[in-house]
């Protein structure tokens, strides 16, 4: 029995994780779950999975959940609130595995707590790694935590690597393993075929309607701007111990191939399948074994074609900005991630236009690019300062 804590169980990745767990009651035992404020869904998850502990970050919502549990005779499920409670469940001795599926840099401290406690950490929360980079990887190295990527691209790359590299996430030596390049695929999002001048009028619902993947709203907007691929570029640098020049983004509109590894001898190994996050989740949950995920087998005869295109950086300036930030250093990456969270939230709340997102991101990176980030306290302080600055640009968007 593998005991499991799911941070962000009410989100898209959290629900997909529970879908896989539901198929294997003899393999996985849910010990703790967390959400921000989704009381109804968390209550339903408690009824079904009977965790020992639940964290609702919002105190008001924690109280509401606790009353519902008492009324349902489930008062033995302990409900706590606040951000430090997330760290408590992430590092609890009763937990073997932590699924890090909170969205945004709010997931950093609990994910890091799981890493420091030496857990098996399933990393969906890419923002945590982007915002802390070497500090995060050093903690993995020190504790000996097993880090497994959930992001479909990174999980695909992981699957295409030799065993030796899989056993050393964050500090593998891929050139020494014969790898010449990592090919990070991306669909290009819903606006790949739109004209540049049409992007000004994009609405939040249009941006969230991804052609292939069904995801939370923040990552859906990131996919539309391709900031998601930019964050993934930085994530790949850290997970696979690479230089930015070793990573290349390839547009692949069908999302059938989830990423590829090119070797020195000319071989390219690709991982493919239906675009469904239950595949990487099942892979990581049971690694190195393979288990059912509930995903339908890939139908080669229904797939008409596999297309590949170079990225048009004029259309995706956020991706360009992220690759530059990756080359600049940690200050730029932390600033970019924080500014982007503010900008995307403002766009989703219709305070700024879709095309303003990159302006806020770029202005913020330029301001904070040379900040030194050498400790987790530096990360938290910079993240906070950038948010205040980016928020001021939202209120007064004259860049
Ligand atoms: P969702 O928005 O669907 O879910 C986010 C989860 O985090 C919810 O459980 C939410 O709780 C909780 N949460 C939100 N804000 C906070 C906060 N401030 N503190 C603590 N918990 C919070 O996101 P996704 O599942 O789409 O994405 C989660 C992570 O996985 C992201 O980092 C994303 O980049 C990554 N990822 C997602 C993929 C996908 O297919 N969705 C693919 C690859 C990576 P509540 O419901 O109460 O708001
Ligand atoms: Mg991805």
Image (cartoon, helix red, strand yellow):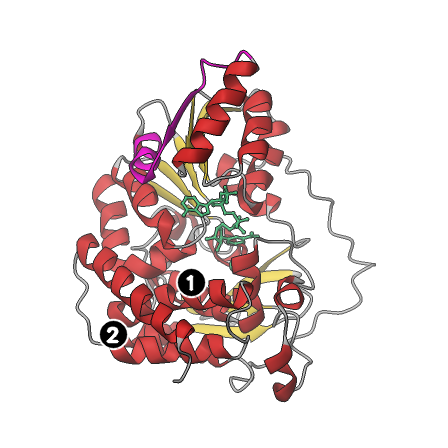
Other-residue count near label 1 (Cα within 10 Å), few / some / many at <14 / 14–19 / ≥20: many
Q: Is residue 385 left or right of residue 321?
A: left
Element type at marker 1?
helix
Q: Is residue 43 above or below residue 389?
A: above
- Residue identified by numbered label 2: 368
Residue 98 lies in the magenta stretch: no
Element type at marker 2?
helix
Q: Is residue 318 left or right of residue 301?
A: left
Residue 172 visible? The answer is yes
**Viewer-side residue, 37 vs 333:** 37
Q: Residue at x 58, y 32 (%)?
A: 40
- Residue identified by numbered label 1: 341
Q: Is residue 378 left or right of residue 221?
A: left
Q: Quadrant of residue 223?
A: bottom right
Q: Give me the disc on residue 95.
A: none
Rendering coords of residue 326 (x, y %): 34, 72
Label 2 beta carbon less than 8 Å to ligand 1: no
């Amino acid at each position: 029995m593998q005991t499991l804590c799911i941070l962000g169980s009410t989100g898209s990745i959290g629900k997909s994780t529970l879908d896989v767990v539901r198929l294997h009651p003899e393999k996985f035992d849910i010990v703790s779950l967390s959400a921000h404020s989704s009381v109804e869904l968390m209550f339903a998850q408690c009824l079904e999975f009977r965790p020992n502990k639940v964290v609702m970050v919002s105190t008001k919502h924690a109280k509401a959940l606790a009353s519902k549990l008492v009324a349902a005779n489930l008062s033995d499920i302990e409900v706590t609130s606040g951000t430090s409670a997330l760290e408590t469940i992430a590092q609890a001795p009763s937990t073997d595995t932590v699924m890090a599926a909170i969205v945004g840099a709010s997931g950093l401290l609990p994910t890091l707590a799981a890493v420091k406690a030496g857990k098996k950490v399933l990393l969906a929360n890419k923002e945590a790694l982007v915002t802390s980079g070497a500090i995060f990887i050093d903690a993995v190295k020190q504790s000996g935590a097993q880090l497994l990527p959930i992001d479909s691209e990174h999980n695909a790359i992981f699957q295409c690597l030799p065993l030796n590299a899989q056993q050393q996430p964050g500090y593998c030596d891929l050139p020494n393993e014969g790898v010449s390049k990592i090919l990070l695929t991306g669909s290009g999002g819903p606006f790949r075929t739109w004209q540049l001048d049409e992007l000004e009028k994009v609405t939040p619902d249009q941006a969230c309607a991804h052609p292939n993947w069904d995801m939370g709203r923040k990552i859906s907007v990131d996919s539309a701007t391709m900031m998601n691929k930019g964050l993934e570029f930085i994530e790949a640098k850290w997970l696979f111990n690479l230089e930015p020049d070793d990573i290349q983004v390839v547009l692949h509109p069908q999302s059938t191939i989830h990423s590829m590894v090119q070797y020195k001898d000319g071989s390219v190994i690709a991982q493919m399948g239906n675009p469904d996050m239950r595949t990487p989740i099942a892979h990581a949950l049971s690694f190195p074994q393979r288990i059912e995920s509930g995903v339908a087998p890939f139908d080669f005869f229904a797939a008409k074609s596999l297309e590949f295109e170079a990225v048009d950086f004029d259309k995706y300036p956020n991706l360009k900005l992220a690759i530059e930030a990756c080359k600049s250093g940690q200050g730029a990456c932390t600033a970019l991630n924080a500014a982007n969270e503010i900008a995307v939230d403002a766009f989703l709340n219709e305070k700024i236009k879709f095309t303003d997102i990159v302006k806020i991101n770029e202005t913020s990176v330029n301001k904070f690019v040379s900040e030194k980030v050498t400790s987790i306290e530096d990360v938290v302080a910079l993240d906070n300062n950038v948010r205040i600055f980016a928020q001021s640009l939202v209120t007064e968007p004259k860049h």
